[in-house]
Amino acid sequence: MILSEAITHLEELKNNGTLKKVGGALEFSNIDQQVPTPAAFVVPERERAGANKFSNGFSQDVVDRFSVILVFKVVNDRSGLKAEKEVQSVRKAVKAQLRGWQPTEEYEPTEFEGGSLLKLGNGKLVWQDSFKTSIEERG
């Protein structure tokens, strides 16, 4: 998995003011605590290996899937229009940052797979965007 590389890559969005926090899965597990928003947390989704291509040794394509979970504060926004604009703006920036990005030379460029609403309530909106990349492992 390339989670630490993805976190480091998203830090640029913190440096330019798009995000106020970038973290990993353990930090996301404390989401009920106060967190500066908008925030992004990179968490593992799934790793899947293809069949071995060789009978002597191994060569497998491995697909790494990870999510960027975005957290927004939603207050005094009955219509949801303010939140919607912020969510779309931050999602656009995250997708632009990760699409086509190669965690290392060995990995294929990262692709966006889709997104979904995880939670809305208690003054928070939590959205998940999924990405994938792959690598050929040999030995």
Image (cartoon, rainbow, N blue to C red):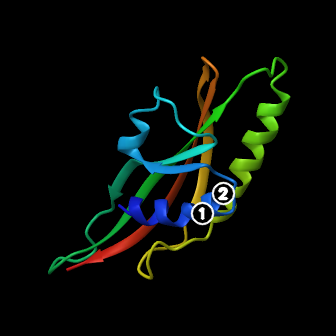
Where the C terminus falls, by quadrant? bottom left
Could you say which disc has been placed on residue 98 in the image? 1
Locate residue 26 relative to residue 116 in the image: left or right.
left
| Foreground residue among 135 and 119 | 119
The answer to whether the residues at label 2 and label 1 have Cβ atoms under 8 Å apart is yes
Locate residue 54 relative to residue 56 in the image: left or right.
right
Q: Residues within 10 Å of mark 2 (few under 14, many from 20)?
A: some
| Foreground residue among 21 and 52 | 21
Where the N terminus falls, by quadrant? bottom left
| Vertical relation: 8 (above or below) 124 | below
* Residue 25: % across, % down: 39, 44
Name the residue type under label 2: Lys
**Residue 47 placement: quadrant:** bottom left
**Residue at image mark 2:** 95
Q: Residue at x 54, y 54 (%)?
A: 131
Mark 2 and mark 1: span between their CA atoms? 5 Å
Q: Secondary structure at mark 2?
A: helix
Q: Residue at x 41, y 80 (%)?
A: 106
* Residue 74: % across, % down: 70, 26
Locate residue 127 relative to residue 135 in the image: left or right.
right
Q: Residue at x 64, y 21 (%)?
A: 123
* Residue 56: % across, % down: 14, 81
* Residue 120: % across, % down: 63, 22
| Vertical relation: 42 (above or below) 49 | above
Name the residue type under label 1: Leu
Q: Residues within 10 Å of mark 1 (few under 14, many from 20)?
A: many
Locate residue 21 relative to residue 87 in the image: left or right.
left
